[in-house]
Image (cartoon, helix red, strand yellow):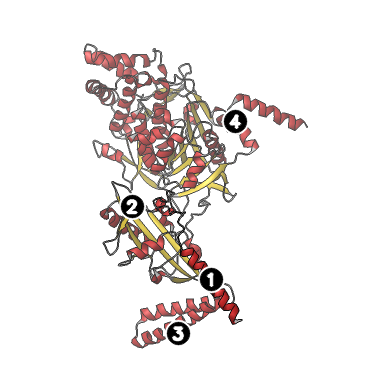
Amino acid sequence: MKALKKLKKKEQVKKESSKNKKSPAVEEDPEYQMDTKARMWDIIAPEGIKINSEDFGIIKQSLGTKTYFRPIYIPRDGYPRKMQTNWIYNMTSSGEIDVLVDVHKVGKSDAIRTLQRQITMLQSNLSFQTKRGNIDQVNDLESKIRDTDQLMSEIQFSENDMYNVSTLATLYAQSEKELDRYSEQLEDEMSSSFFSLVSTWGRVKKGFKSVLPFGKNVIHDSLRNIDRRALSTFSPFISGSGRYMGGVPLGLNKITGQLEFINSFGNSDYRPENYNMFVVGTSGSGKSVTLKLLIARELTGANIYSRLIDPEGEFVRITKRLGGINLNISEEEDICINPLAINFTDIPLDEHDEELELLEDTDEREIVDKEGKKFIRFVPLREKMNDILDFFDIICRGKNAEDRGLDVFERNYLEDAIQFIFKEKLGLTSHPDSLFSNEVVKVDNQLIQSRVRKPEPTISDVYEYLITNFETEHKALRLIAAIRPFLKDGSKPIFDGQTNLGKGVTQSLHNARLVNFNISQMEEGFLRPIAYHVILNYLWEHFVKNLDNATKKKFVYADEAWTLIDSDQTVSFLEKMARRSRKRNAGLRLASQDFVRFVTNDKARGILQNTHSYLFLKQSKLDLKAIQENFDLSAGEIDVLFGNPDRGEGILRIGKSSVWLQTNPSEEEFFFIESNQAVYEEKLKRKQLLHQR
């Protein structure tokens, strides 16, 4: 055996010596070639990281900018005794931040041993605090002992588990000042939920590395033991279900499969900031179907009164089927909506309104009592004058707003005319009694002897005053020429005269549950926008502000609102309605194809800022950037809107809560709300055939 080992050793020595000898025929290649293939670190690593401070560092990511970062964590004593679901959403939605939740399950025996040791320490401290007579500490320690003892019993019988959990985060900002401001805002936000945050002081590198996706937490003093119930609150995802507040069903939740309800007016537990809603989507995305579902279901199930402005005739059929009133506004119809008509307004006595600031004489008002609530009643003459000037500004601009609006001279001429008609001709003041006279008047073949409504000022009154006083003024000629076609004997007579919506209709408008103003037969580029503006004014004065409707829940629907963006006056009026409808128990519902035009228009942005509920249906990819910049939609929600959603599929955003839903009209409802005549007749034949079978 020894000889065999010596032989093997000699052979091994020979092999090693032969390897070390250089062959004269083979030359070694110089090591000049480099590995040209990029590694993972070359792709993901920044240009450099510098840490010169105790609690923040700097990342160099591009040639011209620096990113400041600050690692933070929740200390062991920084958690409240009770945690609400989704508390971590306050961190993840606060801004540029990475959050790490490090979870380690503790074995059953180790958990019980740890809890026993903790109870012993608490009892010892309790005995000490009892001797000192520290009542606050005694009560706190007794609560902790009870909680710990209960948790130990649950773990012992496998009803609960213990975990060591750590919550760390890294904040990012473009400057040190911005980083400090962001840190303070987040600290205030978390402290409102009784959480405290601390920085990784002196351990910036360790804190930064712990949050990176390496799966290694080196901030060991951040670990805190919690049970299974508390761990469930660490979920970073908002619930897929919306908050149930009653109302009517709108569609099916795409995540849970359950019905989602909408109640824009809220309930006793929750009142939204306003009752307005914006439905936006491309053509064919299901906007009209959604609005019709809301109208039909709220009319029958929620006792809501609705008024519609219908530029395309979409809602004529459903209004008829629901027993509502269709008003076909056109030059051929015997209908007049007077833009100069004035009415008193009512404001609750305990509320402040900007209309009160327009009163010239604080005594020109009266106090009325309606259902046990007191209101201030007055005539807003100044506000009405501004509305009338806006009307004449629109008609002076001409078709498609090609011409300029009122200049300073034309505005002065009109103000003179309106003030003369209000004060001299009709004797109107801010007091509501000035709208009535005590003369004997014959109305609809009936003699009325007291408190008769005075005639409304008309366009003809303004025209006659201008002709009488300014016909020779060169600067008034354009204004006079622009008004001429809108007189009763002109080509566009529907705005001149006393308001008349049809025999017997005007009186029933106050009690009708559903009224549709169909303006689809009017000239699209000129008369239709004017009619839209005038009808909005009429609904504001006689529907939203009407004291008889004070306790009713009301909605004004404005379809195809994007067509009004070019009219500054109409957009301003919509913004006023969006701001001031809530205190009159009313809401504004807009539907539009073009979302970007609302975002880029300064006045239209005011409407968006005063809208609490949104329904985003299928969007154009051109609008992606605008929606991302203005709404905090997640990547998944963006994928829904800009992918290929079905008709009626989208994201319902109410406040900060989002729901992925699909509107769910039944076959009967779809047949009921169908506005396309050909499709309607086809479905009707199919239904009749099925009935015959």
Tag 3 or tag 4, which sits nearer the N-term? 3
Name the disc covering residue 120, or none: 3
Crowding at dot 4, Cα within 10 Å, few <14 / some 14-19 / many 20+, comes out as many
Residues at marks 2 and 4, CA–CA distance in whole angstroms: 60 Å
Contact between labelled residues 4 and 2, with CB atoms less than 8 Å apart: no
Q: Amino acid at mark 4?
A: Glu
Residues at marks 4 and 3, CA–CA distance in whole angstroms: 73 Å
Which residue is denoted by mark 4 in the rendering? 674
Which residue is denoted by mark 1 in the rendering? 12
Quadrant in the picture for residue 7: bottom right
Residues at marks 2 and 1, CA–CA distance in whole angstroms: 51 Å
Image x and y of residue 15, in percent = 52, 67
Tag 1 or tag 3, which sits nearer the N-term? 1
Residue 197 in view in this figure: no
Mark 1: secondary structure: helix
Q: Amino acid at mark 1?
A: Gln
Name the disc covering residue 522, or none: none
Mark 4: secondary structure: loop
Image x and y of residue 575, in percent = 36, 36
Q: Amino acid at mark 2?
A: Glu
Residues at marks 3 and 1, CA–CA distance in whole angstroms: 67 Å
Tag 1 or tag 2, which sits nearer the N-term? 1
| Location of the N terminus (image quadrant) | bottom right
Residue furthest right in the image: 693
Q: Amino acid at mark 3?
A: Thr
Q: Is residue 248 above or below residue 198?
A: above
Residues at marks 1 and 4, CA–CA distance in whole angstroms: 94 Å
